[in-house]
Image: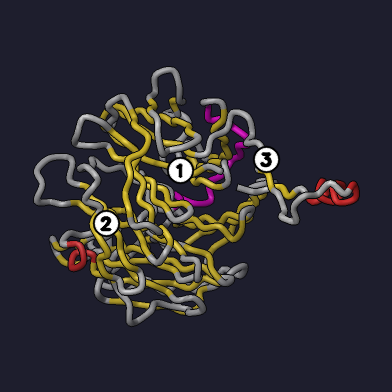
Amino acid sequence: MKKITLLALWGMVAVLGACSSSEEKEVEPEKEAGTYNFALWPTVGSWPNVSYFVLGFDKLTEGTASLTGQGADVTTTVSSAVINKNGYYYFYNTTEGKFSKFQFKNDQLQTITQMPYTHLVSMTGHTWVDDNTLIMVGLDATSTKINYSVIDVTTMKITNGQIAGVPAIPSGYTRLLVGGDIQFVNGKFFISVGFMPGGYEIYPEMTVLEVKYPSFEVGTVSKDSRTAGVGSTSGYYGTSFKTESNDVYFLVNWNPAWKPGVYSPIMAYRIKNGATGLDPNYIIDTKAVLGYEASGLFMNVGNGKAIIKYRDTSITGDYQTRYAIIDLATGKLHKRLTELPGDRTGERNVCASEGKAYIAINADTTKDNIWIYDSATDTVTKGLEIEGGYSSFTRLDKLD
């Protein structure tokens, strides 16, 4: 949170000779009335009859909360594939052909701006150049080209175009598959692509493109034959990040079959700061490391660690989801978060901030809670209790 330094006040006190300390004092500005520090997205019902809600909180470390008397039903307004940045949500509604900016305030998802928009068939990935400049990517109507949009989220000016230099689709394949594993770093971003036939068997190789900004021209093309998937859609899932040292990590988690009836394995990769392609000496084989393949979550929690989600398929029933911490330097398992109860899971039910991971658990026990993993102390604590018996928690966002 930004702080306001009272330099002017110090100067006045110094002139009056009343200063008793040379230390600079700071105060935090008041939060905008009606806004929240965090938002949780619980769901009620089962597909296709699912209702989506948003609940706002100022802290997740203690207390209880429920939808009774608070929260907003957003089912007819957005899906959980929103983009969250600095207290605002952005959403591409492909059905209605519009792009919108919202703020969750006073228990309502309030519309700031809406405009017609149809440049992407759907948004598969997004990244931020800075706090004001959003890049979204996705396929064109033929699924043979990758479109992009650059959005100034203050003026809401949209600049559309097409990425140049995408590798040709191999013979026998007809369309592209574009990943959501996209991060902007050092004037470029990286994105994975796959090649599909008329059906759902993917070309047996993973391809990563270095895309230069603002030209949107492909530079280095990296390939790896140990998997053939791409990163999951970034609105729904969090499977890529850049560290404090600008190393990029991403999980190849959207994995169609690469052989008849055989799905390609789920791997995590690294692109080192200053590099233009994959680190050839680094890969995380999630099944080898965890005993089970990763499941749609890979987030930086600071101090050289990342949180990863997996499904323990030896457990019968809906509550198979478990969490672990990965040592990023080695790519090895640091620890399993065995303190957490079994989870029914949700797409983006974890948010990471200031060295902590906040995990919304839809538990196999009688109570649901937010759990907090602290990467500095390597400890887990139980936080806010969520009353109500929900179907899932699809998102947990830090808003400030």
In the rendered image of this protein, does residue 132 appear above or below residue 112? below
Mark seen at residue 397: 1
In the rendered image of this protein, does residue 331 appear above or below residue 60? below
| Earlier residue among tags 3 and 2 | 3
| Earlier residue among tags 1 and 3 | 3
Could you tell me residue 12's position as x and y percent?
87, 47
* Residue denoted by label 2: 324
- Mark 3, Cα crowd under 10 Å, few <14 / some 14-19 / many 20+, is few
Q: Quadrant of residue 100?
A: top right
The residue mark sitting in front, 3 or 2, is: 3
Asked whether the beta carbons under mark 3 and mark 2 sit within 8 Å of each other, the answer is no
Mark 1: which secondary structure?
A: strand
* Residue denoted by label 3: 29
Q: Quadrant of residue 212?
A: bottom right
Could you tell me residue 382's position as x and y percent?
32, 40
The region drawn magenta spans: 108-123
For marks 1 and 2, give the CA distance: 20 Å
- Mark 1, Cα crowd under 10 Å, few <14 / some 14-19 / many 20+, is many
Most extreme residue toward the top is 69
Is 164 or 76 nearer to us in this picture? Answer: 76
Instruction: Based on the picture, tell me whether residue 23 belongs to the magenta stretch.
Output: no
The residue mark sitting in front, 1 or 2, is: 2
| Earlier residue among tags 1 and 2 | 2
Could you tell me residue 395's position as x and y percent?
39, 41
Q: Residue at the spot x=31%, y=53% of the render? A: 296
- Mark 2, Cα crowd under 10 Å, few <14 / some 14-19 / many 20+, is some
Is 95 or 370 nearer to us in this picture? Answer: 370
Q: Residue at the spot x=25%, y=65% of the render? A: 333
Asked whether the beta carbons under mark 1 and mark 2 sit within 8 Å of each other, the answer is no
Mark seen at residue 302: none
The amino acid beneath tag 3 is Pro
